[in-house]
Each structure stands twice: as structure tokens, then as C-alpha cells.
């Protein structure tokens, strides 16, 4: 835990306020100095914050007239414009001096220097972990590669979180909570030099007692768990990154690639190279949502295991796939299936859920980043399973088809705007630029009504809101369909209610009979994957060309 000592100041008791203040700030690393000196002269920059981490020191430090004793494992925060004086006794002091900016938002994209109401003096029981982080930061910060400077700044922000996290939380004395803390630490900081002694230091226990308590609770030794975490991280990098074994070994905390290879084989039964080959040619891939299932089918791969329900009708046609859940993954079924690889699409949340952590213990888990384009997702999976050429060929065919259909459609509807409206039970939404929008507005180049460009994914609305979009044409599809017959009927009822409403008939697209229906296909077209997009292209071509043919027929009769 971090214990705060303050002399001559009011003890802070509003941890939530400090937490909010720190979370609202942007921190930028300016410089790191490693000092070995008995000099008492100390010059602090008046525009920056400073952090002093003393590895070894005897004497005192004066910060704006307040005197504190110096000793090993002490940390001091120095505000801009603060007067600082060191009084070093006997031997040299060994410390790090970090200078950084703390900025708060001032509106319209501008930032100003923040005034942090944090204590001067901190004492960290897990001080050595912080020093390890600082040493890595210093190496990155002084590197020639501009990316290293960015990595150093990211590490510094993680250090700020680590340093103050315990300050703003209540002390956790319970042994189970202490062990949970060490588990969380290993999962987050596995690349660092972590020893049994350092983990015990975090809990305030002796190394032997900590090891016994840990093994009793977790059923494995601390270092065994650490090795498993590192190997699981290495598995993901092996199948995704394409980096050298040496680079992967170092990035997950092993000293060299030879030791890494020995530990990897001991844990998995095969060498890193054979493991990559095994995954590349394995048919045992589990898909944990419809998005990834569509990617695999587009690559002509039937998932070994998958979530199966009528919300994405394609899954009900999979004859040899093991069902590992109806809506969410069933961990017991997933463990029983024993896949070689798990593929999932990420949420917009940064933190991993407890379930996601368990997935990695069952098999290496590839999580597709939510913000990435579907083509990137598709090529990522293709690279992992050794089908990069097939993916490129598929995308080339898709782009050719999209271009052909775009030219045909544009010649019929010109610059008329298209709005995608999702209908659910008692709910309605407008779909934005993602999912179906990426095809409609991106690949087909159709015009979006005003207001749609500001909707990344979807936006729930009321019927009266549709007037604001002034769409020339409307496409009705499903919203939050769970695949049940009840939801099919509920959506049909909602559509009937729309056509009984005067506000609906006031819409330009409705008056001109330019409304198209896709709500009877559940989420066949709304999933963000190549298979759904390809089917959506065909459906749009069918609907709009049939509409154009009907218009020609009416004109000819006139």
C-alpha cells in the first residue's frame, strides 16, 4: 500500500476528488534523470511538475518550507514554482528525478497547466516495481526511435495510475484481497522483473508465508501463475504479430528466446515454431460472436465451435459446429470443446471482463479491436489461419462487385439520400457509418441524410426525430433482434404501428413510396463482417433495380 505522510498540512480525506482530478488530466513526460550525488543544490523547473524517487538517501528535503526526512523508497511530488532544497548526509544519494506536465482541458481542444492537490510525500511498499518501470521508461525515453518516446510516455501514465491508485482506495488487509492484488499486478505488469519476494512485499507478508497462502488459494505457486500469464500473452503475439521469437520473449518478460522456448515447450508441449504451425493449420477455431463467424465463413472455414442462434440465421445452417452458447459463451461448453484458438470481437470498453481473462486460459484468444475497419479484421484472421491470399482475392472480388453495383444504382437514384432505420420491440434507431452504413455510404457511395455523419454506430430515436433527417429513401431493418419468434412478431407489430401513424406518413420517403424492407432477416445484414456485407450488396442491388423496373413500368403505362 502507499502510505501518505504530511507534515504541517491537512491530511487529505477526499480520495474520490483526487481520483477525479487525476483522471481528468493529461500527463506528458518531459525528462528523466538518474542522479548519484551528494550535492545539495537542486534546481526545479518552474513550469513543470517533478517527481523524486529515492532508491538510497539519508538527510532531509525542504519543499516550500516544509521539511521531510530522506530515506530509501521515498517519493516526493514537486509542484511548479516550488522551492526545493536537499540536505544529503554521509554517502551519496541515489535517486530519479522525473519532470512532467500535468494538463487539464480548458475547452475547444485547449489545455492549461493543472493544479494538482496531491500530497508532497509518498511511501510505496512496492517501490521496486516503480523503479523497474522508471528504468524501462528511461531507456525508451532516450532511444532514437520516436515510437519509443511515445511508449515511454504511455508507461509514465501507467506509473501515475499505479502510484496513486492505492492512495485513493481504502486499505485492503484481507489476505484474499492481497493475493488478488498480486494476481492483477502480474496480469498487468508481466513484462517486468517480478519475483516472489517482490510480490510478497506488496502484501506485507514474508515470502514463505505469502507463497503458502497464494498456493492454498490459487492452487498454483505465484511464479507458476506468472509463467502461465507470460506464455498466454506470448501465444497471442506468436499468432498475430509476426515478430521474432527474441522480440516476443523480451516483450512478455523472458530474458532470452532460448529460455522462453524451453518454458513454452514445458507449458504447451511444443516449441513456439510448431505452435504457430499448429494454429495456422488447425480446424479447431471457436467463434464467440456472429461477427467473427461471418469472417470465418467468408474464408471458407466452418467454425469448430460458435455462438448459434436465429438472430444471425447463417449460424443455424452450420452442421458440424459445436454450439458453445446461445447468446453469450458458456464457459463450461467452451472448456469441454477444447478449441486451439478463440476469436472474438472487442467491445468499446477498455478493461477486459473476468470472462475474457478466462478465455485466454482455455485457448489463445484473438480479440478484434472494435475501432478497426472490417477489412482489417478480415485480414487479421486470414493471416492467423494462413489464408492471406484467399482474403485478398475475396476482397478484390467484393470491391469489383461493389463498384459494378454502385454504378448501376447511382445511375438510377443519383444523389438521393438513404436512411437506415432499425426497428426493435418498443425501440427505434438510426444506423450510422458502421455496419450496414459502411456498405451503403462507403462501398456503394450512396448519399447519407444530414445528421448521419455524426453517428458512428447507431443512435436510438423517437418517431418524430425522423423528420429531421429529411431522407429521400428509408431502409427498414432489425434492431436488437434476439432471434426469437416473439421478436419477429414484435417487430412486425411495430412496423404496422408506424403505418398507422400520421407522423410516419408525413415523411418524404413514405409519401413517395421509397421505403424498403429488410426487417424479416434478423441481423443477417447488420453484422460487421464480409459475409454480411456481401449479402447486403446483393440485397440492395435486388431491391433498387426491382424498384427502378417498377418505375419504368408505371411510366410506360402513362
Image (cartoon, grey):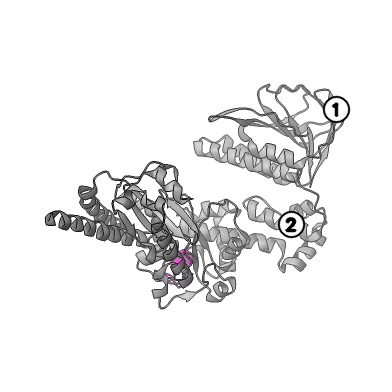
Q: Is residue 406 left or right of residue 422?
A: left
Residue 67's mark? 1
Counting from the top left corner in percent of width and height, residue 513 is at 29, 54
Residue found 64% across the figure and 52% down from its top: 188
Nearer the observer, 313 or 227: 313
Is residue 263 magenta-colored?
A: no
Question: Predominant secondary structure in magenta?
Answer: helix
Binning the other alpha carbons within 10 Å of mark 1 as few (below 14), some (14 to 19) or many (20 upward) gives some
Indicate which label's residue lies in the foreground, 2 or 1. 1
Residue found 40% across the figure and 52% down from its top: 502
Is residue 279 magenta-colored?
A: yes
Residue found 17% across the figure and 56% down from its top: 554
Question: How far is mark 2 from mark 1, CA to CA?
Answer: 36 Å
Nearer the observer, 87 or 92: 87
Most distant residue in the bottom direction: 319
Tell me, yes or no, if residue 482 can be seen here.
yes
Tell me, yes or no, if residue 145 can be seen here.
no
Q: Which residue is mark 2?
A: 196
What segment carries the magenta color?
A: 273-285
Q: Is residue 374 left or right of residue 545?
A: right
Amino acid at each position: 500500500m502507499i502510505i501518505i505522510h504530511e507534515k504541517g498540512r491537512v491530511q487529505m480525506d477526499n480520495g474520490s476528488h483526487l481520483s477525479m482530478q487525476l483522471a481528468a488530466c493529461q500527463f506528458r513526460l518531459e525528462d528523466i534523470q538518474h542522479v548519484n550525488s551528494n550535492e545539495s543544490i537542486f534546481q526545479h523547473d518552474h513550469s513543470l511538475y517533478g517527481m523524486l524517487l529515492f532508491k538510497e538517501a539519508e538527510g532531509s528535503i525542504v519543499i516550500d518550507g516544509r521539511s521531510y526526512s530522506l530515506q530509501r523508497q521515498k517519493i516526493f511530488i514537486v509542484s511548479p514554482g516550488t522551492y526545493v532544497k536537499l540536505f544529503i548526509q554521509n554517502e551519496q544519494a541515489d535517486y530519479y528525478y522525473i519532470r512532467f506536465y500535468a494538463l487539464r482541458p480548458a475547452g475547444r481542444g485547449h489545455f492549461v497547466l493543472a493544479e494538482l492537490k496531491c500530497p508532497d510525500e509518498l511511501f510505496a511498499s512496492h517501490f521496486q516495481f516503480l523503479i523497474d518501470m522508471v528504468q524501462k521508461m528511461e531507456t525508451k525515453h532516450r532511444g532514437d526511435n520516436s515510437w519509443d518516446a511515445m511508449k515511454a510516455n504511455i508507461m509514465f501514465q501507467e506509473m501515475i495510475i499505479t502510484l496513486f491508485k492505492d492512495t485513493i482506495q481504502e486499505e485492503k488487509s484481507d489476505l484474499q484481497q492481497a493475493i488478488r492484488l498480486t494476481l492483477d499486478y502480474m496480469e498487468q505488469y508481466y513484462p517486468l522483473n517480478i519475483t516472489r519476494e517482490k510480490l510478497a512485499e506488496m502484501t506485507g507478508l514474508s515470502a514463505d508465508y505469502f507463497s503458502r497462502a497464494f498456493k492454498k488459494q490459487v492452487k498454483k505457486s505465484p511464479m507458476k501463475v506468472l509463467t502461465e500469464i507470460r506464455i498466454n500473452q506470448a501465444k497471442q503475439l506468436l499468432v498475430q504479430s509476426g515478430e521474432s521469437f527474441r522480440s516476443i520473449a523480451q516483450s512478455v518478460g523472458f530474458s532470452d528466446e532460448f529460455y522462453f522456448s524451453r518454458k513454452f515447450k514445458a507449458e504447451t508441449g511444443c516449441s513456439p515454431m510448431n505452435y504457430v504451425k499448429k494454429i495456422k493449420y488447425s480446424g479447431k477455431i471457436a467463434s464467440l460472436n456472429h461477427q467473427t463467424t461471418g469472417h470465418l465463413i467468408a474464408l471458407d472455414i466452418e467454425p469448430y465451435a460458435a455462438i448459434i442462434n436465429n438472430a444471425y440465421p447463417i449460424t443455424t445452417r452450420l452442421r458440424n459446429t459445436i454450439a458453445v452458447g446461445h447468446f453469450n459463451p458458456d464457459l463450461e461448453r467452451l472448456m469441454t470443446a477444447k478449441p486451439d484458438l478463440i476469436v472474438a470481437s472487442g467491445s468499446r470498453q477498455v478493461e477486459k471482463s473476468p470472462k475474457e481473462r478466462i478465455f485466454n486460459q482455455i485457448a489463445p484468444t484473438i480479440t478484434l479491436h472494435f475501432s478497426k475497419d472490417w477489412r482489417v479484421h478480415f485480414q487479421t484472421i486470414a493471416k492467423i489461419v494462413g489464408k492471406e491470399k484467399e482474403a485478398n482475392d475475396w476482397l478484390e472480388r467484393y470491391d469489383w462487385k461493389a463498384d459494378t453495383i454502385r454504378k448501376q444504382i447511382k445511375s438510377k437514384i443519383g444523389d438521393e439520400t438513404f436512411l437506415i432505420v432499425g426497428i426493435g420491440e418498443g425501440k427505434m434507431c438510426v444506423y450510422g457509418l458502421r455496419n450496414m452504413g459502411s456498405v451503403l455510404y462507403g462501398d456503394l457511395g450512396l448519399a447519407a441524410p444530414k445528421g448521419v455523419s455524426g453517428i458512428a454506430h447507431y443512435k436510438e430515436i423517437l418517431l418524430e426525430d425522423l423528420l429531421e433527417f429529411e431522407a429521400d429513401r428509408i431502409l427498414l431493418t432489425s434492431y436488437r433482434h434476439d432471434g426469437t419468434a416473439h421478436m419477429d412478431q414484435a417487430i412486425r407489430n411495430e412496423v404496422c404501428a408506424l403505418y398507422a401513424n400520421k407522423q410516419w406518413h408525413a415523411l418524404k420517403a413514405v409519401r413517395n413510396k421509397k421505403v424498403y424492407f429488410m426487417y424479416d432477416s434478423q441481423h443477417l445484414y447488420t453484422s460487421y463482417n464480409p459475409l454480411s456485407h456481401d449479402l447486403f450488396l446483393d440485397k440492395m442491388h435486388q431491391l433498387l433495380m426491382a424498384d427502378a423496373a417498377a418505375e419504368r413500368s408505371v411510366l410506360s403505362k402513362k
